[in-house]
Amino acid sequence: KQEVTQIPAALSVPEGENLVLNCSFTDSAIYNLQWFRQDPGKGLTSLLLIQSSQREQTSGRLNASLDKSSGRSTLYIAASQPGDSATYLCAVRKDTGRRALTFGSGTRLQVQP
Amino acid sequence: GAGVSQSPSNKVTEKGKDVELRCDPISGHTALYWYRQSLGQGLEFLIYFQGNSAPDKSGLPSDRFSAERTGGSVSTLTIQRTQQEDSAVYLCASSLVLATPTYEQYFGPGTRLTVT
């Protein structure tokens, strides 16, 4: 059974810092990995999707990397801003069988102005 | 264009009552998913629809839960004889399945269900 772990569970940083969120998964047979952002009381916003054949994806100040063989992904946020405060979730999709996502428990980020 | 929409946004019901939650996926998206987000449980998969194929119901927690998707578009999740442990946010997502799909999922805002 696929298990997804996110470290740290919570993080508080001053504005302007670069930061790294970590995600690990136990079964490397994945189709892709998706990073989401969730604001309090809201749904999930897709940030980046990395296919299993890719090593990284970038969008603006966000960069996500994937090391499939070691079961790890990182989300790098450059020059953090108070508006980045949210919970960040990573999720993986298996390459066969069930097509649903398996989610980590998230990292709750607070960026202090 | 319009994203995934869900209704109602909030639902309070008494224990033992039935509830129906609705999801309107992004137009043209053939894949539709239901997830549940509970305190202390994280996000868990419930059910998946893809085109005219039989749905993947493997995540439904009990036979009190059912879902249907009419006309390959709108989906309704029904919970019968609700229990307090059913209190959660129910999220719907859809994705576009192409010849070489990414299966990138787009989520709706969710329905917060509270069973009293």
Image (cartoon, rainbow, N blue to C red):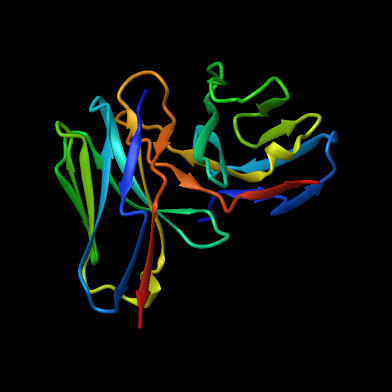
- B112 relative position to A73: left or right: right
Foreground of the two, B98 or A53: A53
Provide residue B90's location: percent of width, then percent of height: 62, 43
- Specify whether B53 is left or right of B114: left
In the foreground, A113 or B31: A113
Among the 4 quarters of the image, the one containing residue A45:
bottom left
Residue lying at 71% horizontally and 41% vertically, measured from the top left: B21
Quick check: can you spot residue B107?
yes
Is residue B28 at least partly visible in the picture?
no
Q: Determine the residue positioned at 46% across, 46% down.
A: B106
**In the image: residue B75, left or right of residue B25:** right
Residue at 69% in and 37% down: B85
Looking at the picture, how far across and down is residue B95, in whole percent? 45, 38
Q: Whole-percent x and y of residue B66?
A: 69, 25
Classify the position of the N terminus of chain A by image quarter: top left
**Quarter containing the C terminus of chain A:** bottom left
Looking at this rendering, what residue extends furthest in the bottom direction? Answer: A113
- In this picture, is B90 found above or below B61? below
